[in-house]
Structures are given as structure tokens and as C-alpha cells.
Image (tube, rainbow, N blue to C red):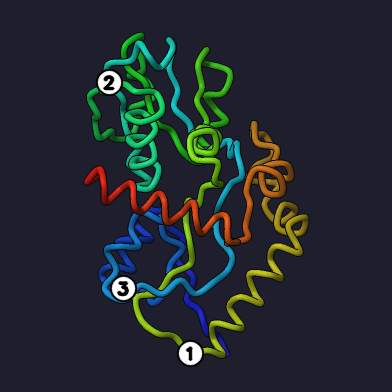
Amino acid sequence: MLQIDLQKDIPSVCADKLLNDEVDIGLIPVAEISKLQNPQIISNYCLGAVGKVDTVSLFCHVPIKNIKRILLDYQSRTSVRLTKILVGNYFNINPEYVSAEAGYEDDIDNQTAALIIGDRVFKYQNKFEYIYDLSEIWLKYTSYPFVFAVWAANKKLNDRFVKDFNNALKTGLMNIDAAISDYKKEFNNSEIDLKKYLTKSISYSLDVEKRKGMQLFLDKIKELKI
């Protein structure tokens, strides 16, 4: 029997659908957990990184210390908050933040940097002299890995479903090569080394160190009111 109606959305939309009870579970940005009325993390799998993640970066033509304005990617609220934490507390600068719209990458100049996430990052890797991988910077700043998204629900779910769901996630991680093969036509001319990205850059286990890093991140959001 079909147990899941799968919907594919950018991270911010996944969060909105869960917050609005349009879906029962979602792979949502960590920053949105506190907005759930009854948050339930239903899996020990996540989207995290221990150091460099490759797909969440600040791009600029000059050193970050010289930046006066940062354009913020509209696709992920966790990455936006991570940017603000690191820019203020690690780089110790206080730029203007601008919520960007599609096409904002063209507005990067000598005083303007941009947060870019997702596959688009690979498109710009050879076009800017300064690229700051935020997961890598977070590890330097805190000594903890970073968690970008977790599988969460807004209500208590059936234990059998949760078990089956996690078994499905495990099966997926055991068959990454097959998944890459299924999408090889889509990424045939891509700059992305999918095997490296999915097996080296992303870390999937929501272990003790990641949970500590995640809690520290949530505490920083609350402390800084961002």
C-alpha cells in the first residue's frame, strides 16, 4: 500500500508546508524547527556536513572584510541565519543584508557579496576569487559539524511508519550509485561530481556531535534574535 505522497520543493517551501499542516513530514531547514507547535525529529538521518559542504557559500570579488552588503538566497532560511551568525561573530563585520530574488547573482560587485546555495553553487565556483564555504567556517568557529535539514513532523506519527520510513532512507543511502545512474542524463553536462558530493560532502548521520552543533545553532538564533 502506498504510504507516501512525495512532493519535491526547495527547503523554504518544505518548511512552509509543514508549518501550515499541508504535509505530515518534511525535510525542513533546522532553523524552522522552533516554529513547529509539536516538533518531532523522526529520523537519525539528516543533511549535514563535517567541514566543507560545497553547496552553501558566500561569493565575492573582494575579501569578506571589505563587503558592505550581502544578498541572501531566498531558498533556505537556515543558510541565511548561518550567514548572519558567521558574518557577525566569526568575520566580525556588520554589512547590510538584502533578501534577494531570482537572478541576484548578477548583482555581486566589489562591495556586494551573495549567499548562494544548492546546485547553482557549482556554476559560480570558477567565477569569483573569494568563496567562503559556510559549513567549513562553522566547523572552524564552533568545532562542531553543521546540520542543514532534518526529517521532522508536527505531530506524533505511527511507530511502524517511522520504522519503515527510516528503513527506506537507509536503503537509499546504500544505493547512491543507482540513484546517480537514474539522474545521469539530467546532470550529464553538469559541473557537479555527484558521487563525490553525495558521498563526501554530505554527511547523513544525525549523531551526537551533529545534535550538539544543531542545538548550538538554534541557541545562537535565539540569542541573536535572527
Contact (Cβ within 8 Å) of mark 2 with mark 3: no
Q: Residue at x 22, y 46 (%)?
A: 225
| Label at residue 22 | 3
Query: In screen coordinates, is 37 left or right of 12?
Result: left
Count of all numbered marks drawn on residues in the image? 3
Q: Amino acid at mark 1?
A: Asn
Ranked by sequence position, the earlier of labels 2 and 3 is 3
Check disc 2 and report the residue beneath it. Answer: 69
Q: CA distance from mark 3 to mark 1?
A: 18 Å
Up-down relation of residue 16 to residue 132 (above or below): below
Q: Residue at x 40, y 85 (%)?
A: 156
| Label at residue 158 | 1
Query: In screen coordinates, is 99 left or right of 57?
Result: left
Q: Nearer the viewer, residue 37 or 167?
A: 37
Q: Quadrant of the N terminus?
A: bottom right
Q: Nearer the viewer, residue 71 or 218?
A: 218
Frontmost of labels 3 and 1 is 1
Q: Quadrant of the C terminus?
A: top left
Query: In screen coordinates, is 176 left or right of 155?
Result: right
Q: Residue at x 50, y 16 (%)?
A: 130
Q: Amino acid at mark 3?
A: Glu
Badge 2 element? strand
